[in-house]
Image (tube, grey):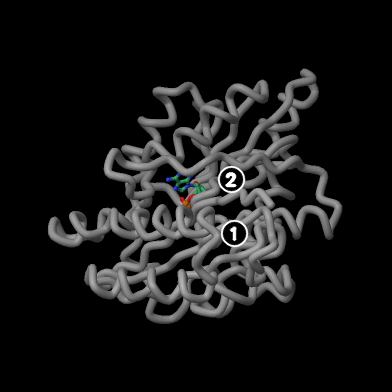
Amino acid sequence: MKCITDIKALRELLKQWRRAGESIAFVPTMGNLHAGHLQLVNRAKAQADRVVVSIFVNPTQFGVGEDFSLYPRTEQADQEKLQAIFVDAVFMPSTEEMYPVNELTKVSVSQVSENHCGAARPGHFDGVATVVCKLFNIVQPDKAFFGEKDFQQLTVINAMVADLNLPVEIISVPTVRESDGLAMSSRNGYLTPEQREQAPQLYQSLCTAKVLIRDKKTAYIDIEKQQKKFLEEQGFRPDYFSICRRYDLQTAGQDDSEIVILVAAKIGKTRLIDNIQVDVEH
Ligand code: AMP
């Protein structure tokens, strides 16, 4: 496995692969790799000749007072995990390599960036869209793999790729969970043992809401209120619990068929997000 920190060297390697007619899959991450990330990598390996994984904790997607400086950086262990599953190259640029000058350009995807996590974390999705666009231009992959765990992020990236005609196919991968239902996340490591015990209730609230939606007896707004209250009783501080249309993340009506329920809530200082998809037959 090649470990590369500069853009020029990565482009040189990619050029050789492309010249040999090999297809390239790309998995962008912020590192501290867990089984969720590795699932993306395994999907990528199955669908391309070469797999490039990036590890970059992108400062521009963190707000003031968020966990940028605390974010777990475990490069050695990450490299070992990627080596063990035969990744071809890991790209680990420094902040200076990615942002050498005070950049004047940013990618901003309107509407789908604005509600839910976008409202709670102003500028977050501009940071995500911009860095992913830069990484796509550096790697120029045939396919790129993203987790459904970050459903709004996936929606933002899909809109960016469609709107800007970026020549990459986005493949989404279902959320990988712990055995008790908690979605795997690098931020789970912040939880105290007691908080870790409470954390699966986040997924539980989504499962309950899914059943209620399928029952069709409760108004969506009431389901949202009930589940927020449930989360408060479990010791969370819910940020939002939203029943949305899957294609544009706007509030779902009772006659919509393709739904995603998005939730974000804090336990202590840790902010967790999760979601579940619901298909409603009419
Ligand atoms: P991150 O390192 O948190 O920025 O995540 C990198 C990629 O891994 C993103 O596309 C995430 O959606 C995806 N990912 C993170 N956690 C999971 C999970 N539990 N299951 C599937 N994909 C995930």
Residue at the image point whose x is 70% and y is 56% from the top: 133
Image height check: is 59 above or below 42?
below
Of 243 and 32, which appears nearest the observer? 243
Of 215 and 11, which appears nearest the observer? 215
Farthest residue toward the right?
Answer: 165
Inspect this view and state whether residue 134 appears: no
Under circle 1, the secondary element is helix
Hey, which quadrant is residue 273 in on the image?
A: bottom left
Residue at the image point whose x is 27% and y is 72% from the top: 269
Mark 2 close to ligand 1, CB under 8 Å: yes
Any mark on residue 146, and which? 2
Any mark on residue 265, and which? none
Any mark on residue 153, and which? 1
Under circle 2, the secondary element is strand
Residue at the image point whose x is 28% and y is 71% from the top: 236
Hey, which quadrant is residue 270 in on the image?
A: bottom left
